[in-house]
Amino acid sequence: MKNSIKFLLLFLFLGLNNFAFTQVDTDKVLINTTVVDFKQKTRPGETVMFVNTKTGEIFSKNSNKKGKCFFVLLKGHEYLIKYKNFGKEVNYQKVHIPDIARLKELKVLVKFQPATAYTLDNVLFETGKANLKNTSFKAIDELASAMATKTTMEVEIIGHTDNVGNKDENLKLSQERAQAVRSYLVKKGIDAHRITAKGYGDTKPVADNNTAAGKQQNRRTEVKIIKE
């Protein structure tokens, strides 16, 4: 899978005054987190996680309509910041929260550019058929979860095959497989108008069809983000 995900430095701003939210213990601090893309556009519905590097405790929130989410975390601890990119957890940056008595709020800016297209991992079908294998559901469920959070998102499900067999049959099979993924998403509660399905058969290989490994790479299901 080739995702054009880039990382930028984490910018930290220490705010020593005024809680806009609930008063917290003196050993804790409010983490005011804003998620934006490279053009500084706020990103609602993004999952951000703070993982305590000592205890392993995970704090997870989705950014609101203004791209913000809030955490209350311990001073003097280090946290690994992660975000989710269509089910995949991506490490962003570590941050150490200073143990300063007057510190009440820490403002954190997370910048990243989500992928606009990606391959669904381990989405497999029975040989020559459009029946999904059990290994397929995890990745599709993660896509359904992302679409449930980002209610304006529209996607295209794209099916591909290797070059074994008749080209017309491969084209038909790829369409049926893309349609099978679309139907599963609809069953998970995603509005049908938000999902289209397109099969390309063996016309868009990403690897050498002369090897078994190459054929396996070419038998893939992709997701293209049409609208966020």
Image (tube, rainbow, N blue to C red):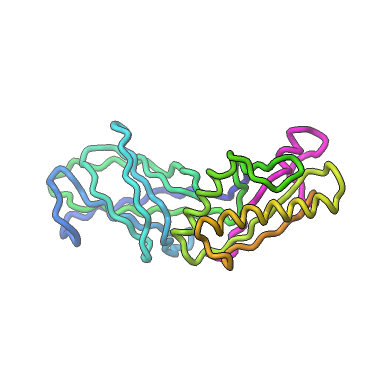
Q: Residue at x 28, y 54 (%)?
A: 70
Tell whether 189 sits left or right of 22: right
Residue 208: say if magenta. Answer: yes
Tell whether 120 sits left or right of 41: right
- How many numbered dots are placed on residues in this image? 0
Q: Is residue 186 above or below residue 98?
A: below
* Residue nearer the viewer, 33 or 11: 33
**Residue 121 lies in what quarter of the image?**
top right
Q: Residue at x 31, y 51 (%)?
A: 12
* Residue nearer the viewer, 26 or 166: 166
Q: Residue at x 62, y 46 (%)?
A: 2
**Residue 125 lies in what quarter of the image?**
top right
Residue 36: say if magenta. Answer: no
Q: Position of residue 41 (x, y in %)?
A: 44, 64
Tell whether 107 sits left or right of 27: right
Q: Position of residue 172 (x, y in %)?
A: 78, 54
The span shown in magenta is 203-228
Q: Position of residue 171 (x, y in %)?
A: 79, 54
Tell whether 171 sits left or right of 138: right
For the N terminus, give its image quadrant: top right
Q: Is residue 41 above or below residue 102?
A: below
Which residue occupies the extreme right position in the image? 166
Q: Position of residue 110 (x, y in %)?
A: 39, 53
